[in-house]
Each structure stands twice: as C-alpha cells, then as structure tokens.
Amino acid sequence: MSDMLQTFVKKEMEKQIREKYPHVQHPSGMYAKVVRSKEVNGRYLCTLKILDIAMNTDNDFPEIPNVKTEIELKQGDIAVILLLYGGSIVFVLGRYES
C-alpha cells in the first residue's frame, strides 16, 4: 500500500473509532482516588479523581462529583470503578487494597 493511501486509511479509521466508538479509547475499568466523601442516609456520596495504571492522577479526566455508592469510601481511598459504555455514569465495584 502506498504511504499516502496507508496514511488516509489510518486517519479515516481513527476518525471512525473516535466518532462511532468513543468508549474504546479509554478502558472501562479504572482506579479512582476519593477526593471527598460524605454519608447520606446510609449511602456514600463521593467526588472521584481518575488515576492511570501507575496510580498517578490522570489529567485527561476531570473530577467526577456526586458518585453514589453503598460501599464505604473515605477521603484518600482508592476505588475500582467502571464507566458504563464509555459515558460518565460511574459504577463503584469496590475499594482497592494493595
């Protein structure tokens, strides 16, 4: 394949993935640090900051406020979360303990 055609195909594939399948650009399961947490009627309302695989803050993501969970999470805890279908709906799987 010529370089021009190969470049075109690559750019077009990247565009299609970005537009039609944005959820595959980031993993659905991630670590998140609990920035704030408070108990409300037996549930926890948390603000989370996404971490990368090395457990450093991932600045590609903003803080995620008002995440509700029945799992007791305190400020400074690391949670394991899912972002459902690549969107912003957060599901807390549990607390990460090394």
Image (cartoon, rainbow, N blue to C red):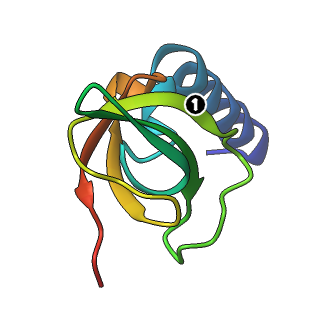
Quadrant including the C terminus: bottom left
Q: Judge whether 20 appears above or below 76 on screen.
A: above
Q: Position of residue 77 (x, y in %)?
A: 43, 65
Q: Judge whether 73 appears above or below 19 on screen.
A: below
* Residue 38, quarter of the rendered image: top left
Give me the residue at 53% from left, 78% from top. Answer: 54
Give me the residue at 55% from left, 61% from top. Answer: 51
Give me the residue at 73% from left, 40% from top. Answer: 7
- In the image, farthest residue toward the top: 20
- In the image, farthest residue toward the bottom: 98
Q: Tag 1: residue type?
A: Pro
Q: Residues within 10 Å of mark 1 (few under 14, many from 20)?
A: some
Give me the residue at 35% from left, 54% from top. Answer: 73
Q: Position of residue 74 (x, y in %)?
A: 42, 58
Q: Is residue 81 left or right of residue 16?
A: left
Q: Secondary structure at mark 1?
A: strand
Say which residue label 1 marks: 65
Quadrant including the N terminus: top right
Q: Position of residue 26 (x, y in %)?
A: 49, 44
* Residue 86, quarter of the rendered image: top left
Which is more toward the observer, 3 or 37?
37
- In the image, farthest residue toward the front: 41
Which is more toward the observer, 48 or 86?
48
Q: Is residue 81 left or right of residue 8?
A: left
Q: Position of residue 29 (x, y in %)?
A: 33, 49
Q: Judge whether 10 appears above or below 95 on screen.
A: above
Q: Is residue 62 left or right of residue 23?
A: right
